[in-house]
Image (cartoon, rainbow, N blue to C red):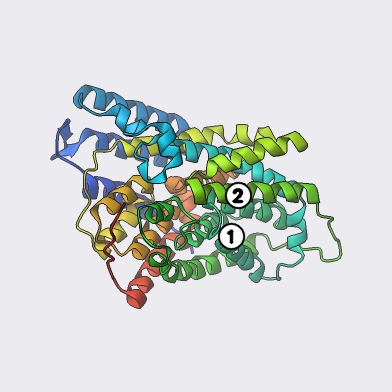
Amino acid sequence: MKLNKPFIGSFLFFMLLTPLGLLASTGGGLTLLGGTRIEFILFGLTLLGITLFHRYTLKIALAGLFLVVVSKLLFDGSYPWGEHFFGNHSLIQQILHKDQRSGEWSVVLNIAGLLLGFPILAKYFQKSELPHSLSRFLPSGWGGPFVLLFMIFVLSAFLDNIAAALIGGAIAAVVFNGRIHVGYLVAIVAASNAGGAGSVLGDTTTTMMWIEGVHPTLVLHAYVGALTCFLFFATFASIQQLKYQPVGNDRSHVYPVNHPMLLIVSIILVLTVTSSIFFDFPAIGLWIAILCCGIWKRTPWREARNAVSGTIFLLSLVVMASLMPVEDLPVASWRSALGLGIISSVFDNIPLTKLALQQGGYDWGVLAYAVGCGGSMIWFGSSAGVAISGHFKEAQSIYRWIGKGWHVPVAFFVGFLVLLLVWGWNPQIIAFK
């Protein structure tokens, strides 16, 4: 199935206007275009620029952030910059007590640490030669790509989606001899996001819900939609990859596993998950492990350097999104949850989830599915997408992402529909911390 550019352009136009239509605030500041705040106008223009000129994404993102900051300095002189970035508690208190975090610093440091650290993890994993060994066990035909996507789906339920996507990308690069279809790259990102949608360890948004008092079982039913979504896009993506490049599994050759490298991978993963559980700060454990293991084996710092531009790009969008004057959301319903999922493809889902938690009245599993999987529809809609596109530059085009990976946006809506039909909309009243 091929999508022409006018169709993709219409889809993108809808995606870019959604944040303006649903989130625009008219209180304070400078308003333009019928009451829409100037920050939203600048944010929309930034996204449009990234869409049209994908070779200059970093420069456009930085320029957009600069203009948003300047506009708030000029037209919103009372904006609480210190409280916004550093919260209303000391940094030590916020590190030790997850429920006291109120500043953007922790989000920025976490994302930066993960985007810079997980490429190092992926390189260690590649050096372990385990991807070569795994290729011997993947089935032939379209089942091989499908099984690999399912492995990523399962892995991301216990690990951050960035790590799951990069590990999956490292395996795919080996088993497909470096020839990966763009549609399959989109599916790798979607699998990592869908796998973490119903787990409080698999995604930052679900972890936030857990910290605020949402019991892990109240987001578990997100997997009804996530698994439906996965089965849809994984089938089409696997067929795409089979036609483009099948699994090159030479079962006659046995590759010896590099056990020291595999041990380093295990140490990094264990400390990352541990710090995520106890501190909601996986980047701390990740970098402690990287630095300690660097004493034993040489650290591939080049991987982190290669990820710097992608990290700055995503952080620019995250900070810009956090500066948007979003003071409240539409009334909680399945329609607003679906809208938040659509917005998540272009707008950071962390501040949206914060607002939803403050507002209350949501079915948290439906919301977790929406904001968790919605970011897969565009490459910069999730940190996993930015991480993958940093290694596979051909994915840094929205036209290619949607044109080749059309099955992911369709799967998102199919999964949401099945989730509503099977589970319904059942808001849970929670006594938040």
Check the image and report above or below for 270 versus 114.
Answer: below
The front one of 78 and 390 is: 78
Q: Secondary structure at mark 2?
A: helix
* Left or right of residue 212, residue 229 in this image: right
Upstream in sequence: badge 2 or badge 1: 1
Q: Quadrant of residue 52?
A: top left
Residue 317 in view here: no
Decide if residue 313 is on the left or right side of residue 251. Answer: left
The crowding category of the residue bearing disc 1, from other C-alpha atoms within 10 Å (few below 14, some 14 to 19, many at least 20), is many
Residue 74 spot, x, y in % from top left: 22, 22
Question: What kind of residue is marked 2?
Answer: Leu
Residue at image coords 51%, 51%? 277
Q: Which residue is mark 2?
A: 166
Say which residue appears at 71% left-offset and 63% top-offset.
Answer: 247
Quick check: 291 left or right of 429? right
Observer able to see residue 150 = yes
Task: Give the foreground label among 2 and 1.
Answer: 1
Q: Around disc 2, counting alpha carbons within 10 Å, would you say few (fewer than 14), some (14 to 19), or many (20 or more)?
A: many
Does the CB distance between marks 2 and 1 fall below 8 Å?
Answer: no
Judge by depth and name the residue closer to the eye, 242 or 371. Answer: 371
Which amino acid type is shown beneath numbered disc 1? Answer: Leu
> Which residue is pictured at 18% across the width and 41% down the height?
25
In the displayed structure, 94 sits above or below 220; it is above
Q: Position of residue 322 (x, y in %)?
A: 33, 38
Percent x, y of residue 311: 51, 36
Residue beneath disc 1: 155
Residue 20 is marked as: none
Which residue occupies the foreground of this view, 430 or 202? 430
Residue 392 horizontal/vertical position (percent): 59, 45
